[in-house]
Image (tube, rainbow, N blue to C red):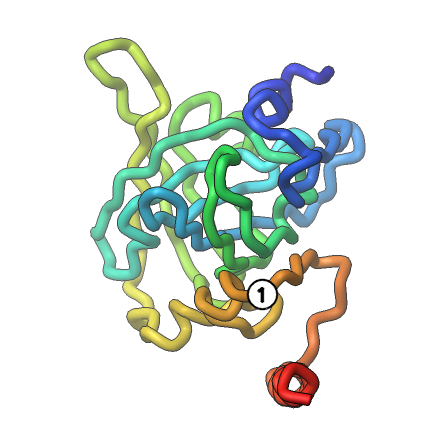
Amino acid sequence: MTPRLRQYRAKRNFAHTHEPAGAPTPASRARSALHFVVQKHAASHLHYDFRLEMDGVLKSWAVPKGIPTEKGERRLAMEVEDHPIEYGGFEGVIPPGNYGAGTVMLWDRGRYEVTQGTPLEAWKEGKLSLVLHGKKLKGHWALVRMRNNDGTKNAWLLIKTEESIPKISARDDDTSVLSGRTMKQIATSNKVWTSSAKPRSTVQSFKARIKELASHRS
């Protein structure tokens, strides 16, 4: 088992969860255009998972209070285990009894770049100056590692830099960029969406839901 995903896999039983087991992409195959994703995760506590494609995996941070949008605003971001690249397309429900049980929405995704060095070098140094090109998030942010008194290094700050962006509306905050579904719709559906599945339009989803309800009444 590759060390980069050992912790991720050890926490999950893939016979009971639809999360991808994945495999790290070899660094030699790293693409010039790297991607980021943000997943809204209603686990024991609602938070946002901020993930950056790097070194063949998704480096990941849990942001309890959401992504900052005002210039100078900063939010605690706790680094967690690396996730497989395939996780960037995951949306669905992690069943009760499993690690991270709860609803997962693909909240935003797009390309990113760092303004200094390479992403891996910046991560090792503990400061990433990021430019995000997402559907909801566009502009500059920074991730800065904090050093705790106990010597741990998993606490970071996610900081909005350069400029403010319009505050995310309640509607956009509750809409998936993959499927167009709300958190409630994801939670009550048995369907697990991935980026390999072709999402239906909102109209198609509505018609399918009407047909489903009609079949239950007949």
Q: Nearer the viewer, residue 158 or 120?
A: 158
Q: Closer to the camera, 196 or 123?
A: 196
Q: Residue at x 65, y 35 (%)?
A: 84
Along the horizontal axis of the image, is 96 left or right of 57? left
What amino acid is at disc 1?
Ser
Using the rendered view, name the quadrant where residue 213 is placed. Answer: bottom right
Q: Quadrant of the N terminus?
A: top right
Q: Which of 9 and 54 is in front in this view?
A: 9
Asked if residue 196 is positioned above or below residue 65 in the image, the reply reads below
Where residue 8 sits, quadrant-wise, is top right
Q: Residue at x 74, y 30 (%)?
A: 23
Residue 116 in sight from this viewpoint: no
Residue 85 in the image: x percent, y percent? 67, 40
Q: Which residue is drawn at 32% across and 53% down?
A: 66
Identify the secondary structure beneath mark 1: loop
- Residue bearing the label numbered 1: 189
Q: Is residue 48 above or below residue 144?
A: below
Say above or below: 214 vs 97. Answer: below
* Left or right: 111 as drawn, with respect to 15: left
Q: Can residue 215 be seen in this view?
A: yes
Who is closer to the viewer here, 32 or 79? 79
Label 1: few (<14), some (14–19) or many (≥20) C-alpha neighbours in 10 Å: few
> Which quadrant is the C terminus positioned in?
bottom right
Q: Residue at x 40, y 51 (%)?
A: 42
For this orientation, the residue located farthest to the right is 29
